[in-house]
Image: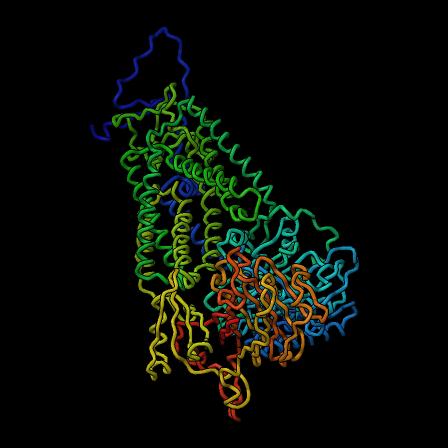
Amino acid sequence: MSSNEAEPAASSSGSIHKGSQPPAPEPAPDAPPQPTRPTSVKTKKETEPSIFIQSIRAIFGFRKTSLTLFVALTYLVVLLIVPLAKRNTLSLPEKEPSILTSSWLDLQTISHKPHPYVSHANDEVHDYILSRAEALAKSSKLNITIDDDRETGLTWFEVSQSWKNSTSDFFPLHRFESGNVLVKIEGKDPNLDGVLLSAHYDSVATAYGTTDDGTGIASMLGVLEHYALTGKQPLRTIVFNFNNNEEFGLFGAEAFFNHPWSKEVKYVINLEGTGTGERAVLFRTTDYDVGKHYSSVRSPFATSIFQQAFATGVIRSETDYRVYTKHGMRGFDIAFYKPRSLYHTTEDSIRHTSKNALWHMLGNSLDLTMDLANSKKIGGNAEDSAVYFDFLGLFFVVFPMSLVTSLNIALLVAAPLAMLFFGLIISKRKIWSVGFSFFRLPISLLLGFVAAKFVNHTIYFFNPFIVSSDFMSPLLTVGATFLFVNYAVLTTFQAIWPVHDLKLVITLEIFAVHWILLLATTVSAQSTASGSGYYILTIFYTLYGAAAIFGLFGLSVVPARKKSTRPSSYGSISPANNADSHTVTDADNENSPLLSNSIPEFDSESSDHSEHHFEDDEAHPEHNSFAYDWSIQYLIVVPLTTLLSYVSIQLCLEGLNQTVQESLASHELVFRIILYSAITLGLPLLPFAYKLNFLFALALIFTIIGGGLNALTTAPFSADSPIKFRVAQTIDLSGDSVPYMEAFGREELLPSILSDLPSVKSSSANVTCESVGDGNELCHYSANRPYLINGTASDNDFNSYLDVQIIKSKDTIASPYSPMKVELNITALDNRFCYVKFNSSSYTPGNGKSPVRMVTYFNDTPPANTSAVASTMAKYSAIPVGGSKDADGNDVFKWLQGIDEIHLHKTNWSQTMYHLGIQWVPKWLEDGEEQQPIDSPENDLGVTVSCYWGEWDDVAVVDGEPIRKLRAFDELLQYAPQTASWSNRFEGLVRIDKYVQL
């Protein structure tokens, strides 16, 4: 029948007759009149919902286009807001503060040349800091006191299992002459524990020390200047420790605890630099009661993920903070953290930092110092670790770890109970049937993981070092692969076997995974710093739980509705022949609720607004759900989890990506982080993936292709992101005395660089390399000799640089039950650091127990060439264990566990000799074997003396002619490609060794 024939006719009473139905029978003549119900008839224009309502429905309806738009906007906002927040954090005040102006000049002055502990430039920086402090103290009305360890002769003499050699059976003995400059501002209340600010002014030999740690020193000078010039006395005493020799042992911080002012302070702010600038992050804080004071800073930048990385050993390098906390202090470790490829190289210079970076550290340090120093009371619970992070540099969030643990336990119990409650209601009403849809996500996750791992491994195989300069391309490529596979799998399942509210099914499954992870981390981490980075898991668990509970609530509370029966086509109303009017239901007017009491079956994109006849029985329960609940669930889960994931992942990879240059283990770790980070970024979208349209899939394909090509074809190293190698020139006076250059780095990268050096090509010597494990190799080549001192060519003979004289050999007439005794004079010209290692027929350092039990450091200046044994070495049994002084004022250290090495640091350049007395136990006396003659080779002690020099950016005047001190290092800087950078392998750039048998 044609549409015209199907058109209903309106009776005069307003009733509508369907064309497919016979006319109603005429009423009996005597029948009472039947009441009639007028039909509301409005024009099309009157019945159409407003543009606003139509827009709301179009945007918030669960439609492919709407969802894809939401996702695009989410990613756009995240990608825009993060760099904008960084820019805002690094912004400078409109009017430059005077302390920033002077601190910038301080930083420029400090960074004039490399100034390691073993250099004369180190003294220049020491003198500059001292003069600045004296000038500020003189100009201030505050009571400011200055103490110079170099003048007072403060010395630290102790066995210390440093962070480098933390094994329980390795005992190096350190003798360190301190060059710390200390400044004290007296507080109003001397009974309150003071605050310590600390940074180190030494650099490594290959760097100008601008960020590591010149910025920390300049920031401390800025804080000191603020107090000195404003004259505002703090409530608590403030001590500034401008310490020396942090780079190879944290010695300046250790020496501080031999100073009487160490007893006046309890809280510490340690300023450090392990990168080359930008923002200074809060690495660590000791506890919540102290850590909450960081909320006072103007530009917070912090995450306890770094704190967890230090606590669990993922980050193995250390700062002075470790020493301070070991001695019971509480406080903060604040540091620049990227990029590592420029850190400890010549690129750690003024041109790679900015006033913005300096102000970020200086401004925050000043705020934090003022807050701590003016606090009447600081909480005393030092055991409760802090969980903390900043939100886009706008504010600082911090909780005690105990509270987070309690919250985790509560959430682990409450959220499942709430879901169980609503689940029982849903089950009782038979509202929701999902069949076997719970298997969809595991299948898609497995396939997505396999595909993502394959892509990740492909990048690792073909361009393994790309993450050093660009971790974002691999991250996006792997993440897009993971998302695309999940999108394809979930969409296919839904198209073939549709199920109502699949997004809720997936949300519940992801929640279950988070429940297991949160339970595991809560049990394992308890309330220690090793679990302080898991806060992000707590947040994600809470958000997924909220979204899941909301979805279950929506299913459980909607009322039953009438079952709709679609009219047959024969009974439809043709709008073509009724253009001016149609019947309006309640769902069509502007007073309709945004959250409808019914949704289309299987989440269809559009609703059918044709007229329905309703029956009294309940409709299919799967239709009873909020029509717009998806948007609320999306807003709960996706934006915040995506933002937090992206910020945390970016922060971690910025700090760790260039560790791929350091070892194979680190390399593999970084790629694992990229794989799981990519999955984490994609996880929030999985509940909605099956509803995204083809444009989203197309975008993922383009990302995979574009990101993959970039990750596979881009050169991994550049001038801005070079590969870093560690070098040193070594001369073995007990061997061939050839000045070899040693270069250490990742395998297969060094030979081509070194073989192209002019000195190598012009000589007959070859570059020889050997694997040293963990993906690294050590290469050697004969290089230009160094010139270390001013004088004649004969003065610069290698044997003049270092000489070891045995003043008194072992006593052949001594009692067989007493230790062997010997004295050495070590001559090292223009030198500040040597170390002495021991070995015997049954012992090598780190392997076995050292036979050396006591060391005497003779303080005679210059040392006598005759024996000074006398009282100290003759009375071994009377000497107490540990450090002591003998009757002549010499330093004595006795250690029954055995002394493995002696590290000798001095500040006096005019002292050319180290005078040592050594006592060791014969092998037979140690292990109970048969007694050997006193002069048996079994009782000999081997001694290797190694001394270091580190001034490359300088000249020596030899026979009246200036000559560069370290020409071999100059050659590397001049002729190596700009994609390579160089750092010192040891405490200096030149090491000279000599072996003697005692």
- Residue sitting nearer the eye, 396 or 955: 955
x then y, percent, for residue 663: 41, 61
Residue 95 seen in the figure: no
- Residue sitting nearer the eye, 891 or 703: 891
Residue 863 lies in what quarter of the image? bottom right
x then y, percent, for residue 681: 42, 49
Residue 556 lies in what quarter of the image? top left
Tell me if residue 938 comes above or below residue 686 in the rendering: below
The residue at the far top in this view is 30
Residue 748 vs residue 382: left or right?
Answer: left
Give the image's coloring scheme. Answer: rainbow
Tell me if residue 48 comes above or below residue 355 in the rendering: above
The quadrant the N terminus occupies is top left
Residue 236 vs residue 3: left or right?
Answer: right
Give the residue drawn at x 45%, y 24%: 424
Residue 927 vs residue 188: left or right?
Answer: left
Give the residue drawn at x 63%, y 46%: 383
Give the residue drawn at x 48%, y 33%: 549
x then y, percent, for residue 266: 69, 56
**Picture mark count:** 0
Tell me if residue 814 comes above or below residue 400 in the rendering: below
- Residue sitting nearer the eye, 504 or 525: 525
Give the residue drawn at x 73%, y 50%: 377
Residue 945 seen in the figure: yes
x then y, percent, for residue 358: 59, 67
The residue at the far bottom in this view is 960
- Residue sitting nearer the eye, 500 or 717: 717
